[in-house]
Image (tube, grey):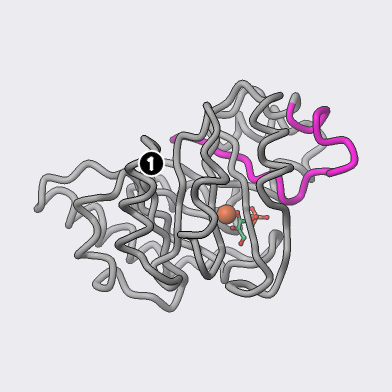
Amino acid sequence: MLIAPSILTANFARLEEELIKIESADKIHLDVMDGHFVPNISFGPHISRSISKVSKLPLDIHLMVTDPLFWIDQFVFPNTEYLTIHIEANHTEESIKKIKQANVKVGLSLKPKTKVYDIIPYLKDCDLVLVMTVEPGFGGQSFMEDMMDKVVELVKIRKEKKLDFLIEVDGGISDKTIDICKKSGVDMAVAGSYVFNHKDPKDAINSLK
Ligand SMILES: O=C(CO)[C@@H](O)[C@H](O)COP(=O)(O)O
Ligand SMILES: [Fe+2]
């Protein structure tokens, strides 16, 4: 299981120290919120660029924005591995094309109320599918276990259609919820509050792994 800590719960006044604490993770998950697609504003390209310069880990960037087409280029850094857009946002097809043109891996995310059926036409272009296990917008919410049905469905579709995207979950991941994710077939888990509220974030990452 790959672990991508979300820095949303980190202390932003001491960001470099916080990044050092999660060096043993596989990726860093950056939650970009525009105050329109979700009812919250987090940070944008400027802070993301600074993070990209001090972190050695690949960036897994989760764009919770209404118009990804406008933003994509601004999040392409040398260590951007995934740029994930939402199927519920505008211009999905064009956005996927733009991410590919930037030589970045394509991620597509679905909110809890969105069905796997809706993303099927795009799966052939995806390197990653992000199943939200909370309503996007805030860290520290409770894990929605019923989202595991979507993970199981995606594992089946991936096999049937011989595709090779990773399946990621995001929201409410902790030592209590990671096992059901593993059993359902998740490849990568995002964890924010569990890692950054832990007295030793390195131990938290280890226990999830
Ligand atoms: O995308 C989001 C929230 O919209 C997430 O990445 C959260 O930031 C994860 O936080 P926890 O639920 O692990 O606290
Ligand atoms: Fe996220």
Q: Residue furthest bottom?
A: 113
- In this view, 206 is above or below 155: above
* Front-most of residues 207 and 36: 36
Density class for disc 1 (Cα within 10 Å; few <14, some 14-19, many ≥20) is some
Location of the N terminus by quadrant is top left
Query: For the residue with label 1, is its CB less than 8 Å from the closest atom of ligand 2?
Result: no
Tell me: 14 left or right of 191: right
* Residue 183 at least partly seen: no
The residue under label 1 is: 187
Does residue 154 show up?
A: yes
Q: Residue at x 39, y 50 (%)?
A: 107
Q: Amino acid at mark 1?
A: Asp
**Which is more toward the observer, 138 or 79?**
79
Please give the range of residues in magenta: 1-19
Q: Quarter for ligand 2? A: bottom right
> Residue at 79% across / 33% down in the picture?
18
